[in-house]
Image: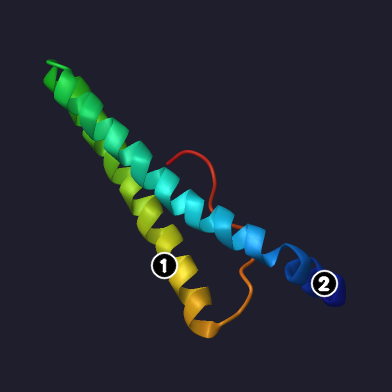
Amino acid sequence: MRLRNRAWEQQHGDEVQRLMSDQANSYRRKAEECDAAAERVTDPAVRAVYLAIGARWRKMAERQQAIEDFFSERGEPRSENTEHGNP
């Protein structure tokens, strides 16, 4: 089974790396959207919620970046298993 995974990684590795990089950037954009929404609302409770969600997106971006950095430093192909979804 590992041999099949290695073949898949060799065939799709560049695409996976691009998607992982896009994922970290996507999380950062979501955080920026939350920050912008927090600036637009007047209700302090709603503003706090937007800021908390933005902080979660930033944390996810940091974690995703750490995963990317780890694999880059080791020179290994990256796994297709990355964090996805909502904070």
Extreme-top residue of the structure: 42
Disc 2 target residue: 7
Task: Classify 23 as above or below 11.
Answer: above
Left or right: residue 7 compared with residue 26: right
Left or right: residue 3 compared with residue 9: right
Which residue is at a point 28% across and 32% down the rendered structure image? 34
Which residue is at a point 49% across and 50% down the rendered structure image? 23
Residue 73, image x, y percentages? 47, 82
Task: Classify 46 as above or below 56.
Answer: above
Task: Classify 52 as above or below 43.
Answer: below
Quarter of the image with the C terminus in it: top left
**First along the sequence among labels 1 and 2:** 2
Q: Which mark is residue 66?
A: 1
Residue 28, image x, y percentages? 35, 46
Task: Classify 77 as above or below 56.
Answer: below
Q: Give the distance between the C-alpha atoms of the residues marked 1 and 2, in whole angstroms.
A: 25 Å
What amino acid does circle 2 point to?
A: Ala
Which residue is at a point 12% across and 22% down the rendered structure image? 44
Q: Secondary structure at mark 2?
A: helix
Residue 1, image x, y percentages? 87, 72
Give the quadrant of residue 32: top left
**Label 2 crowd (10 A; few <14 / some 14-19 / many >=20):** few
Left or right: residue 63 compared with residue 40: right
Q: Which mark is residue 52?
A: none
What amino acid does circle 1 point to?
A: Ala
Residue 60 in sight from this viewpoint: yes
